[in-house]
Amino acid sequence: MKMTFPIVIIDDEDLIREGLRQFLEWEGYTVFTANNGQKGLDLIRKNQGASLIVVDLQMPVMSGEQFLTALKAEENPAIKNAPVLLLTARSQISAHEGVAGIVRKPLDLEDFLSTVKRLCPSD
Amino acid sequence: MKVENTEAIFKFLVSAVQDYAIFALDPQGNILTWNIGAERLKGYTAQEAIGSHFSRFYTPEDLARNHPAKELEQAIIYGKYEEEGWRVRKDGSRFWAHVVITALKDTEGQLKGFAKVTRDLTDRIKAEQMRATELAYQETKALLNASPSFFGFVDPQTGVLTISNDLSLKVIGKTREEVFGKLFWECPWWKPLPESAARIREAIEKAAEGESSEFDVTYWSSPEGTPKGQARWVTFRAIPYRDKAGKINQIAVSGIDFTERKAAEEQTKEAIRIRDEFLSIASHELKTPLTGIKIHTQLLKRMLTKDPVKTLTNERISQFVGIVELGMDRLSRLVEDMLDISRIENRKLSFHFEKIDLSELVSETLKRFRLELADAGIEVITDLEAGLLAKVDRFRFEQVLTNLITNAIRYAPRKPVEVTLSHANKRAVLSFRDSGPGIDKKDQEKIFKRFERLISANEVSGMGLGLFICKQIILGHRGSIRVESELGQGARFIIELPLAEKEP
């Protein structure tokens, strides 16, 4: 049986994180959330993988950049190769290696959904 | 007197005159007679001179323009020709001559020849030139001393400063005697700054070899009455000065102080940098609540159009609308802060004072934040002296309190906050103590400045305007705000306000 990993949303802003979670759950996804990079990483390790990681760049404790570095250092391929969507309010952002896409705040939910569908097609 | 006698006396007189060359020419300009004065002046003996043409005393330039012949022509036409000009001695040296040529004619008007009297005026010219030089020197000195720049001369052989203007001496509080004759790069302008001294030395050595240089360098300024002195910026020039023979006999050194301009430029740069950073932080801050609002309005829209039966519950609608409202409040607070900043900058922050019991205002405001404080796990301990009246702008003062409360929520959650109100020396003293991370001594002034945030943008959100606005508001109340803190020891903000007279 094929194991399905959850989508993990990491953002310190409650309004954004919970809104996105609600939206993706309505779309039939299993969603876990965390409010900083460290908690997000712990969550992904606990689940031994993620089908998609949506991560904010600017967060306390562990920022999005630090999270990406830590993620790539993981051994489990289901963790380190999980597709990552960067969520950011920065207008100028440099390309990040190993990132599947960048979502700019304020985001459009329909656009967001089509990106999510492309990266992890629901079964 | 017999004619023979007078003629003899005259001849004797002419031959004995030493200071004038007096001699006769035939009509073609050939020399007929020669006196001692002529020999002394021109260096030729009578034997050498007599019979030769008088043009031999002229410079090549004069010969080229046929000047000797023209002089004779003029003498024939007007009877006499007079001028001052350069003449050449036998040894090739020149002297400045006063020359009178008189045409000698017989009773019929027939030209018989010329009498020529020449006087050496070189000494007079030299004296005049020296006077002019002295005058030029005095003028130059006055000019240099009136200049806002530093000037001086350095000897190319030794590197020693030989002269400099008053201003350059004034900025180091030294007299001429103290610096003239010293190695230039060891003078007090450069000595305390080894790097500058090395550059100056290099520039002087280059100039001694004929190469000019210009660069910006720091010098040490220590005018009289300033015990410490300070490093300042100067645009320095070293320019070799050559004499007619091409030998470098002076190095002109000059400097223009541009410290103030540099400081202004750096201030402008810093202001632009801060503003750019502010814009980037501000747009980030605005986007965050905007994103929350946008997500939840889109969710509401989706609920209305898709699957309304399952999702569209009253509870959910009011929850989402509440979230949108919260985001709007945050947005308008941010916008208000930015407007306050612009009001402060344009000095348009206005106040509407009323006499208010401070303890009431403080407890009202704290009450309004009861829920947020409880959410953040902050227990508020108060000790407020009742009946302290102050002239306060209610709205603005609440803004200050709100700021302190939200700072505690943001930076010092899950720890108690102590708020006390008392009075001392006719001033109300409001103290707001948290148990957060504390503020380093070196940063305590900074936090009241515009756009300053100690914790990087990655960690805690905010624009860094809050305490700056607070301080401006408190200053507008003729009060003061300060912080007492040490790293790891929490922070205590203390506001003092002048007390108002109690109603009779």
Image (spheres, helix red, strand yellow):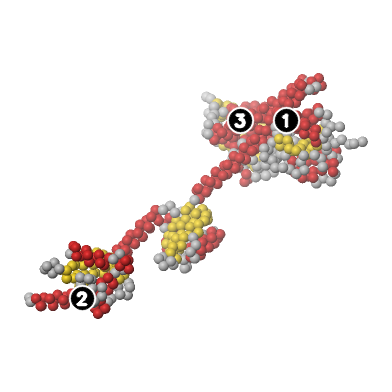
Q: Where, by quadrant of the figure, is residue B370 drawn?
A: top right
Q: Which residue is mark 3?
A: B336
* Residue at the spot 80% in from the left edge and 36% down from the top edge: A119
Type of amino acid under label 1: Asp
Q: Which residue is mark 2?
A: B33
* Residue at the spot 77% in from the left edge and 31% down from the top edge: A113
* Residue at the spot 32% in from the left edge and 66% down from the top edge: B64
Q: Position of residue B315 (x, y in %)?
A: 77, 21
**Separation of residues labelled 1 and 3 (CA atoms):** 27 Å
* Residue at the spot 74% in from the left edge and 29% down from the top edge: A109
**Separation of residues labelled 3 and 2 (CA atoms):** 110 Å
In the rendered structure, which disc, 3 or 2, sits on the residue that comes first in sequence? 2
Q: Is residue B349 left or right of residue A14?
A: left
- Neighbor class of circle 3 (other Cα within 10 Å; few <14, some 14-19, many 20+) is few
Type of amino acid under label 2: Thr
Depth check, mark 1 against mark 3: the one in front is 1
Q: Which residue is mark 1?
A: A108
Element marked by disc 1: loop
Compared to residue B338, the image places residue B239 above or below, namely below
